[in-house]
Image: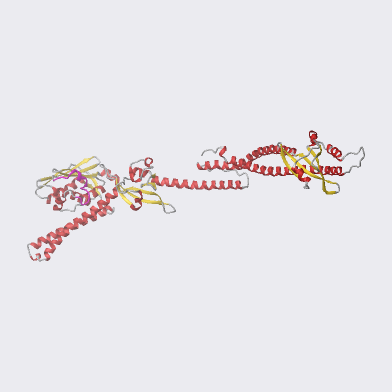
Amino acid sequence: MNKVGFFRSIQLKFIIIYILLLLVAIQVIGSFFTTELESQLVETYQTSVDDRLRLLSHNLEQALSRELTGAEDEVTPEEEVRGIVAEVGSEDGMELQIIDNQSRIIATNDYQSQSDVGKKISNELVQGVLQGGETEKKVVQYNREQIYVIVQPLYKEGEDDVTVGVLYAEANIQMVYEQLDNINQIFLKGSILAIAVSAFIGILVARTITKPIMEMRRQAQLMARGDFTQKVNVYGRDEIGHLADTFNDLNSRLKHSYATIEEERRKLSSVLSNMSDGVIATDNTGAVTLMNEAAGRLIGHDPDDIIGELLIDVLQLEDKIVDITELQDSGSMIIDFSNEEEEFLVRSNFSTVVDDEEEITGFITVISDVTEQEKVEQERREFVSNVSHELRTPLTTMRSYIEALNDGAWKDKEIAPRFLEVAQNETDRMIRMVNDLLQLSKMDAKEYPLQKERTEFVSYFHQIIDRFEMNIPEHITLKRDLPRGKYLVWLDKDKMTQVLDNIISNAIKYSPEGGTIQLKVENNRHHLLVSIQDQGMGIAYDKLERIFERFYRADKARTRKLGGTGLGLAIAKELVEVHHGKIWAKSVEGKGTTIFFTLPLMNKMWRGER
């Protein structure tokens, strides 16, 4: 977060506001004070001048109203008036002129205007007062100076309606305004000093306000970085103090919330990290915002490299989904990531994330590897299909022959026995198939206990071969390649007999006329290797691994023609594995097939059982 400059700070704003308020106050007070002071000074000066002129006019009226007695040394009224006016010096800023009722100047106190004495004056104010007007008073500006002009009538003593002259006075009031200017200068200097002091005080006041705010700002920056250990100082119980208390309370609550969120985040991270399913989160545009390691392993990319990519591109859904909004309707789908080397299927489940206003804010995709599940499901479907087909074939055959018998064939002594024999054979075939299925079901459910015993395998194998030789077709030869000596194994004879019967029966079934079946046992240190090799038509390499699957037939037409349930090798595989052995096959098309299986020797197996 950038530091706020002084010229943009709230501190400067506080100072400016404080100074502006002070300036407004000073301006208002100064205007009011100046106006009132000017009014008071002017009024006082005018009153002073008026009082002086009132006394002077009284003396002048007495002088002008006096009548001459005729004495030789008698002073004329004009001379007396001049004497009275002469006593008023012009240096105190007042100039006087006394005009008689003939508009002639009879006296003045201005020595420079003595030549005007005896001359008539044509001043309008004077003429107006001589003609019976009232006293005139006004302030005029002359040569950039303010002059207070007074024109006052002089009445005959004892007769207020008889004007004997006029008193014309000019008082220089400029000194009053000069005093006002001096006072204003003093006031301005005081205002500047007050503003300076106020600015300093404003800085102090602003700092008392902004300091807690700056501390809260620094604390907010620490909180933004996840540090909730510090507190804001509380400097008082005012509004800012309450704000600081609230900020500290907010800090405590955020600390608790942050700890809770962090704990939940760690839990979520742990859950996502340890999930076997992949989780991908996107925003409302479909851009990936989160992906766990499991999802990265499933799609074969580093989760950090996928952030920001579109989900449709990541899951290769361009051909299935055009717009990300279609995901909310798709629900779940199987995505094929298979290549030439291996099959790989992924199930994707989509769900939406909505806000309080039910607006979609993102999508959550859970992906899981369902390759094996799909294989099992496919095998289950094939198994059900095969069982249905295998059961339908003998049932169809039986139905056809029974219908023929019902239609009257039972009366034919030659045909009826053959039809009944076919029905009997098909019935036996279905019973064998059902028994094989029940046996496999018990093996799958681990409900097929073994009755193991110590057995000398070579002599036991000879007995199995002897039994087959008694019933073998004439065109098939059994060739023994069994070692001398005793080889003890731990096995269930009945179950192992079933294994050998199934393998040898298949070898006899698929052997051509004149074919030889080689039965061999080898000692490979810790186990015996048993092999049964025929000279039949063989099995293609790409089909060899599947011959141990249930109901699988490399050549279905020929297999059904020869009979069998298609479960013999599957049962043999299960029984060999529960004896802790392995079974596999090798084949060359046109040359025959060899079935191999191993059995642990007694010394190793005995220790394992105990």
Residue occupying image coordinates x 12% and y 60%: 421
Q: Is residue 508 magenta?
A: no
- Does the magenta stretch mainly form a helix, a strand or a loop? loop
Residue 237: image x %, image y %? 63, 47
- In the image, 86 versus 412, the foreground residue is 86
Residue 514 vs 115, above or below: the answer is below
Q: Is residue 275 visible?
A: no
- In the image, 10 versus 443, the foreground residue is 10
Q: Is residue 328 visible?
A: yes
Is 373 placed left or right of 116 in the picture? left
Residue 470: image x %, image y %? 12, 51
Residue 267: image x %, image y %? 44, 47
Residue occupying image coordinates x 21% and y 41%: 523
Is 399 placed left or right of 74 in the picture? left
Q: Which residues are magenta?
A: 537-552
Which image quarter: residue 219? top right
Residue 431: image x %, image y %? 19, 58
Which image quarter: residue 94? top right
Image label count: 0
